[in-house]
Amino acid sequence: MNLPAFPGQTPAVATADADPAQLAAALMQSRQTILPKRLVAPGPDAKQLDMIFSAAATAPDHGQLLPWRFVLVPQAARARLAAVFGAALVERDAQATPEQIAQAREKAHRAPLLMLVVVDGECGDAGIDLAERLVSAGCAVQNMLLMATALGYGSSLTSGKALKSSGLRQLFGLAGGEHALCFVSVGTAQSRKPARLRPVPADFVSSLSTDDAAPEREPADPF
């Protein structure tokens, strides 16, 4: 079975004795953020897009609430989003220059695949709080980014103050309990920066103390 080429790598060939953990690690380590302005056509086709969304469906979801959804922004709708971006800037800064407004509007036209991530804080069991729903959405998004990477595409997450604007909420038809979390962009990477240095487990792993003393920040060696 031929595996998709990871960005910057030649296609790998899976053999009967291939280590799934090593393949997964290679995929995760190859993912990097590519700014939307560096993402160009072609983007994922219909079959690939289905694979990306199917990856999202494997995310943890306490209570099976499905507390997140994705709204695609096709090319024909980019002008509507651009108008919202421009208006949101003017609402925040009445002194914004025409150049700044044009720059805000232009962001809606980047990347061949663009979607908004929406999280519902009120659907289903009220005992499942917003934090859990956000974690589930984050897992779904990461799964999509990894699948896009496996398919050879670049991707990124973007946010900004426009996400909280009334114009954006109206454009995407957000209900009262819904939150615009971020945008996901996917496309062919026109250029890449060198891979950034990743943190190592010692930077973010610690152990709970067995007594009443303060938690140890210096981690034990769990690996």
Image (cartoon, rainbow, N blue to C red):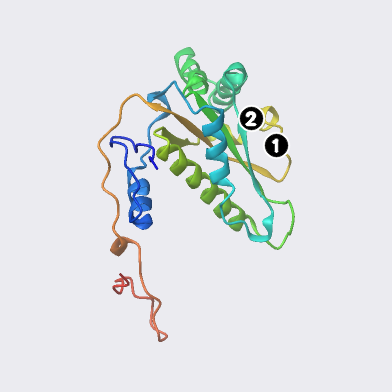
Q: Residue shown at 58%/34% (left/top)?
A: 116
Q: Which residue position is annotated with label 2?
A: 168
Disc 1: CA contacts within 10 A as few (<14), some (14-19) or many (>=20): some
Quadrant of the drawing holding the C terminus: bottom left
| Side of 192 relative to 54 (left or right) | left
* C-alpha separation, residue under disc 2 versus residue under disc 1: 9 Å
Location of residue 151 with respect to 120 vertically, above or below: above
Residue at point 35% right, 36% down? Answer: 5
Is residue 100 in view from this perspective? yes
* Label 2 close to label 1 by CB (< 8 Å): yes
In the image, farthest residue toward the bottom: 211
Left or right: where does residue 121 sit relative to residue 106? right
Residue at the far front in the pictured view: 16
Secondary element under disc 2, as helix, strand or loop, is: helix
- Looking at the image, which residue is at 40% across and 86% down? 211
Q: Looking at this view, is 55 or 31 the one in front?
A: 55
Q: Which mark is residue 174?
A: 1
Q: Residue 133: x and y, percent?
A: 61, 54
Q: Position of residue 162 (x, y in %)?
A: 56, 31
State which quadrant residue 6 falls in: top left
Mark 2 is on which residue type?
Leu
Query: Which class describes the residues within 10 Å of circle 2: few (<14), some (14-19), or many (20+)?
Result: many
Residue occupying the point 65% across, 59% down? 129
**Is 155 displayed left or right of 204 in the figure?**
right
The secondary element bearing badge 1 is classed as loop
So how many labels did they put on this image? Answer: 2
The answer to whether 95 is drawn above or below residue 206 in the figure is above
* Quarter containing the N terminus: top left
Residue 104 lies, with reference to residue 15, above or below; the image says above
Q: Position of residue 94 (x, y in %)?
A: 55, 21
Q: Amino acid at mark 1?
A: Leu
Q: Earlier in the sequence, mark 2 or mark 1?
A: 2
